[in-house]
């Protein structure tokens, strides 16, 4: 489903594209409800907004993932209805996740999920955690597709 975009220097990148039989507005509503992500992907054990109101640039959320510790993610870029970028930082590397929606007509969308890790430890951590990270991105893509295509949501 996905492919390794690049592994160069201090960056590790992974990207998955999935076509969804749902309008881009539907896909956006599901993505923008970050606290609801555990309903459609097993890659998230919990998501709790730390900021009030809708998700906007600057919003923060605590994200818990199986087999990994909790992390705080901050939205760093957003185009409402089209996608957003958020990142989690620690002293040795930064993880950046992107979600981009491309309308393909009235009831179809393409979603591109991207993950980039950068920092001096990123290539070393890709060895023990790379497979798990890629699996989580693949789970998000498949779960988003299933959930958005379901009629009774």
Image (tube, helix red, strand yellow):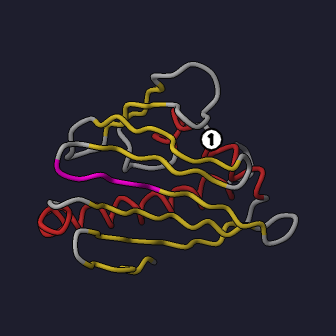
**Residue 92 image position (x, y, % from top left):** 17, 50
**Residue 36 image position (x, y, % from top left):** 54, 36
Which residue is drawn at the image coordinates 27% and 78% (left, top)? Answer: 7
Q: Main secondary structure of the magenta part?
A: strand
Quarter of the rendering occupied by the N terminus:
bottom left
Quarter of the rendering occupied by the C terminus:
top right
Residue beneath disc 1 = 32
On the picture, is 11 further left or further right than 41?
Answer: left
**Residue 139 image position (x, y, % from top left):** 42, 60
Q: How many marks?
A: 1
Which one is in front, 86 or 32?
86
Which residue is drawn at the image coordinates 45% and 72% (left, top)? Answer: 15
- Report crowding for label 1: few under 14, some 14 to 19, many 20 or more residues within 10 A (C-alpha): some
On the picture, is 105 further left or further right than 148?
Answer: right
On the picture, is 28 further left or further right than 14?
Answer: right
**Residue 71 image position (x, y, % from top left):** 30, 37
Quarter of the figure with residue 17: bottom right
Which residue is drawn at the image coordinates 23% and 59% (left, top)? Answer: 119
Which one is in front, 94 or 65?
94
Which one is in front, 45 or 126?
126
Which residue is drawn at the image coordinates 35% and 71% (left, top)? Answer: 13
**Which residue occupies the extreme top position in the image?**
52
Q: Is residue 95 magenta?
A: yes
Q: Is residue 84 magenta?
A: no
Quarter of the figure with residue 111: bottom right
Which one is in front, 132 or 9?
9
Determine whether the residue tagged by mark 1 lies in a helix, strand or loop. Answer: helix
**Which residue occupies the extreme right position in the image?**
106
Q: What range is drawn magenta here?
A: 92-97
């Amino acid at each position: 489903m996905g492919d390794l975009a690049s592994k160069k220097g201090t960056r590790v990148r992974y990207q998955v594209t999935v076509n969804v039989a749902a309008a881009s507005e539907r896909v956006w509503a599901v993505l923008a409800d970050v606290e609801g992500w555990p309903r459609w992907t097993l890659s998230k054990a919990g998501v709790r907004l730390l900021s009030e109101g809708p998700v906007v640039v600057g919003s923060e959320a605590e994200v818990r993932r199986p087999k990994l510790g909790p992390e705080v993610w901050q939205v760093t870029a957003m185009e409402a209805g089209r996608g957003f970028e958020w990142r989690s930082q620690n002293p040795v590397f930064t993880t950046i996740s992107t979600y981009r929606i491309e309308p393909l007509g009235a009831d179809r969308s393409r979603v591109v999920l991207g993950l980039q890790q950068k920092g001096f430890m990123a290539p070393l951590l890709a060895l023990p955690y790379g497979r798990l990270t890629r699996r989580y991105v693949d789970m998000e893509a498949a779960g988003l597709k299933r959930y958005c295509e379901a009629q009774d949501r």
